[in-house]
Amino acid sequence: MKKPVYIVLLTSLLFLAGCTSATLEYEDDEIAAVVRGEEITIGDLRFLYPDKGLLDKIEPTAKARLVVQEAKRLEIELSEDEQELLNTDVKTGYRSNRAFAEKQAEKFDMDPKEYYEEYEAIANEMIAYMSAYVTEMVDIAVDDDGEYDVNEFNKKADQLLDELFIKYADEIDIRIQE
């Protein structure tokens, strides 16, 4: 049985944050973290998230980037649902997130629709590969009806991601701390 895509669980990695009110005094090209040789800049973070609490997004973004790298390294295939996520039509999402897109696009002197298309492509790739990785790696008992305990799955998924982060800790350099 294919485990369902838990987008809520996976996107929580992307959007975990406290409410840091410190004004960012960093330039967009400053490196916030390096994950197995791949840089995450302040500009990358600013593109994905509002400025408020931005520094709180460094570690979750590094974890997400690590999971995408690991899924690709292991050549984990995306399910049909995950493939579909990569090809999602952004019109519906744009309408419901228009205020966010307009504010973010202004930071980068972009058209809001153009911004949102790029944002969705980046976010959806992370979510799709994170979903594929977790679905592939989490082993959980299924009952006779093909059901399983969602809480147990989520707990094992969180543990898996924490273990992956620990495994590659020497290849992850968080350069900016809050």
Image (cartoon, rainbow, N blue to C red):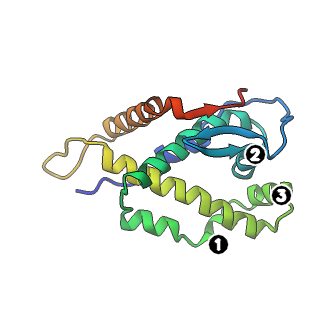
**Which residue is pictured at 47% across the width and 45% down the height?**
67
Quarter of the picture containing the C terminus is top right
Which residue is disc 2 drawn over?
Answer: 50
Mark 1 — residue?
91
Q: Quadrant of the N terminus?
A: bottom left
- Residues packed near mark 1 inside 10 Å, few (<14), some (14 to 19) or many (20 plus): few
Camera-side residue of 44 and 56: 44
Q: Amino acid at mark 3?
A: Phe
Q: Secondary structure at mark 3?
A: loop
- Pick the residue in front: 72 or 1: 72
User: Position of 9 compared to 34: left or right?
Assistant: left
Q: CA distance from mark 3 to mark 2?
A: 12 Å
In the image, which is nearer the foreground, mark 3 or mark 2? 3
For image coordinates 37% across by 33% down, the residue present is 155
Residue 99 pos. (x, y %) = 77, 58
Q: Label 2 is placed on what type of residue?
A: Pro
Q: Is residue 177 above or below residue 67?
A: above
User: What residue appears at the point 64 percent right and 31 percent down from the top-left corner?
Assistant: 174
Q: Which residue is mark 3?
A: 108
